[in-house]
Image: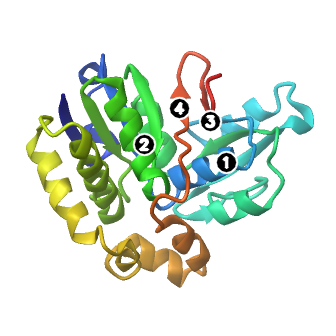
């Protein structure tokens, strides 16, 4: 098994994902929000590129079974039902709903991963389960970080490192690329206290300053769930259970 990490969605080479298991990360906040939504009974999440497309697709005969959710530059989108908030999705009734979801970075990374053999949604809240799922598939693994405005995201790089650490625990012979080794070193620096990212990660500090500290707290927790949502491009949905 070979493990690589892409620091940004732009760094993803679709042809390199063929036959590979991909794990997509956007700790603050998209992948944590997706995991939370599906854990609370959401039927499916549909990742879309932009707000116009989200509104259009939600209006195509879904009635009250659809919601539109997302953000741009960290801010709620006017007229949307929900923003990109694990706290909101954990408290608002989403059971049985299909959510058309668009974010600045996370949904872009998911769409970039479509060529992979299997695509899992990972964050700190499911890091051990996501690592076990990826290792269990027996393929090479590509970890795709959603990035924060074009620069490497410390919280995503840390999560990637923790995923690698846990994969190595069951697959010690896995070969790591240079990027994977760097992420592993970062992850091991935070393994004892991911809460330090509230101070160290620039995007965490910005969200806290904007009054979204509860979201940051919800995102910077380890292994609160064993759910590993899967993005299935041929049905264009992220689901919690493939049945």
Residue picked out by circle 2: 130
Labelled disc at residue 208 = none
Q: Are marks 3 and 2 in contact (CB under 8 Å)?
A: no
Tell me if 81 is positioned left or right of 9 in this view: right
Where, quadrant-wise, is the C terminus in this rendering? Answer: top right
Comes first in the chain, label 3 or label 1? 1
Residue picked out by circle 1: 39
Q: Are marks 3 and 1 in contact (CB under 8 Å)?
A: yes
Distance between the alpha carbons at the discs numbered 4 and 1 = 13 Å
Q: Position of residue 183 (x, y in %)?
A: 20, 55
Q: Position of residue 78 (x, y in %)?
A: 74, 59
Residue picked out by circle 4: 230
180 vs 47: above or below: below
Identified at 51% across, 42% down, the residue is 107
Distance between the alpha carbons at the discs numbered 3 and 2 = 12 Å
Residue picked out by circle 3: 240
Q: Is residue 6 visible?
A: no
Identified at 73% across, 50% down, the residue is 40
87 vs 63: above or below: below
Identified at 27% across, 32% down, the residue is 141
Mark nearest the camera among 2 and 4 is: 2
Q: Closest to the observer: 224 or 54?
A: 224
Q: Are marks 1 and 2 in contact (CB under 8 Å)?
A: no
Comes first in the chain, label 1 or label 2? 1
Q: Are marks 2 and 4 in contact (CB under 8 Å)?
A: no
Q: Position of residue 23 (x, y in %)?
A: 38, 38
């Amino acid at each position: 098994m070979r493990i690589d990490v892409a620091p940004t969605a732009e760094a993803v080479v679709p042809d390199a994902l063929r036959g590979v298991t991909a794990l997509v990360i956007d700790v603050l906040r998209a992948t944590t929000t997706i995991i939370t939504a599906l854990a609370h009974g959401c039927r499916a999440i549909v990742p879309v590129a932009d707000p116009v497309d989200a509104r259009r697709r939600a209006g195509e005969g879904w009635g009250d079974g659809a919601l539109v959710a997302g953000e741009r530059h960290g801010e709620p989108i006017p007229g949307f039902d929900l923003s990109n908030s694990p706290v909101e999705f954990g408290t608002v009734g989403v059971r049985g709903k299909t959510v058309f979801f668009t974010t600045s970075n996370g949904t872009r990374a998911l769409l970039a991963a479509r060529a992979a053999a299997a695509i899992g949604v990972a964050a700190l809240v499911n890091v051990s389960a996501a690592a076990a799922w990826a290792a269990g598939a027996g393929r090479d693994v590509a970890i795709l970080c959603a990035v924060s405005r074009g620069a490497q995201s410390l919280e995503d790089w840390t999560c990637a490192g923790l995923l690698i650490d846990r994969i190595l625990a069951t697959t010690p012979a896995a070969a790591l690329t240079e990027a994977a080794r760097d992420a592993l070193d970062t992850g091991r620096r935070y393994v004892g206290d991911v809460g330090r990212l509230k101070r160290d990660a620039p995007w965490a500090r910005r969200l806290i300053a904007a009054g979204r500290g509860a979201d940051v707290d919800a995102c910077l927790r380890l292994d609160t769930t064993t759910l590993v949502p899967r993005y299935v491009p041929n049905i264009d949905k992220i689901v919690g259970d493939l049945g």
